[in-house]
Image (cartoon, grey):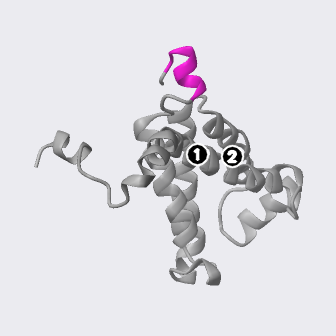
Amino acid sequence: MSTQTLRTSASILPVLNPIYATLSPLADPLVRAAAGLFLVPHGAQKLFGLFGGYGLEATEQFFQAKLGLPAGIATIAGLIEFFGGLALALGLLTRPAAALATGLLLVAAFQVHLGNGFFWTAGGFEYPLLWAIVTLAYAVKGGGRYSIDHLIGKEV
């Protein structure tokens, strides 16, 4: 079966084809923006103590005492989540921002949450691993047509 055959195959509900045609180009940027914007509040918690967070000093103590990570990692994590999340949402420096987020989320999944099992409801690795896979996709493919990278003609 060729790629062309797949593209022209009939829809199960042809009546929805105009909706699919209209919204399909927006699906990818929507997921990119959501992935980035979901990171921002986590960075704001770490850096600024917003959204119920404890701020940088307390977060550094937590990283050191509870996770056994160097305190400075809390600052790096907060910066990646806050500024990298904004960049990813906007599609600005998409690949580097997404790559940094992927690394951060993989550390969260396997260093912090792995011991709690799979399910997020028990503090498991499911949620950070899912978002790591999403951000990895953007690290590979870039911001796409609806990104600042595309607008300025600079896909990094």
| Three-letter code, disc 1 | Leu
Q: Is residue 16 something one can see in this rendering?
A: yes
Q: Quadrant of residue 55?
A: bottom right
Residue at image x 51%, y 49%?
135
> What's drawn in magenta, residue-wise?
147-154
The reply to whether the magenta stretch includes residue 149 is: yes
Q: Main secondary structure of the magenta part?
A: helix
Residue at image x 57%, y 64%?
128
Q: Quadrant of residue 61?
A: bottom right
Extreme residue toward the top, this view:
153
User: Dot 1: few (<14), some (14–19), or many (≥20) neighbours within 10 Å?
Assistant: few
Q: Which residue is mark 1?
A: 30
Q: In the figure, 48 relative to 89: above or below? A: below
| 103 sits left or right of 14 in the view | right
Q: In the figure, 2 relative to 87: above or below? A: below
Mark 1 residue element: helix
Labels 2, 1: front one: 1
Extreme residue toward the left, this view:
1
Q: In the figure, 139 relative to 156: above or below? A: below
Q: Nearer the viewer, residue 67 or 27?
A: 27
CA gap between label 2 and label 1 equals 26 Å
Q: Which residue is mark 2?
A: 76
Q: Earlier in the sequence, mark 2 or mark 1?
A: 1
Residue 142 is tagged as: none
Evaluate if marks 2 and 1 touch, with contact meaning CB atoms under 8 Å apart. Answer: no
Q: Nearer the viewer, residue 133 or 64?
A: 133
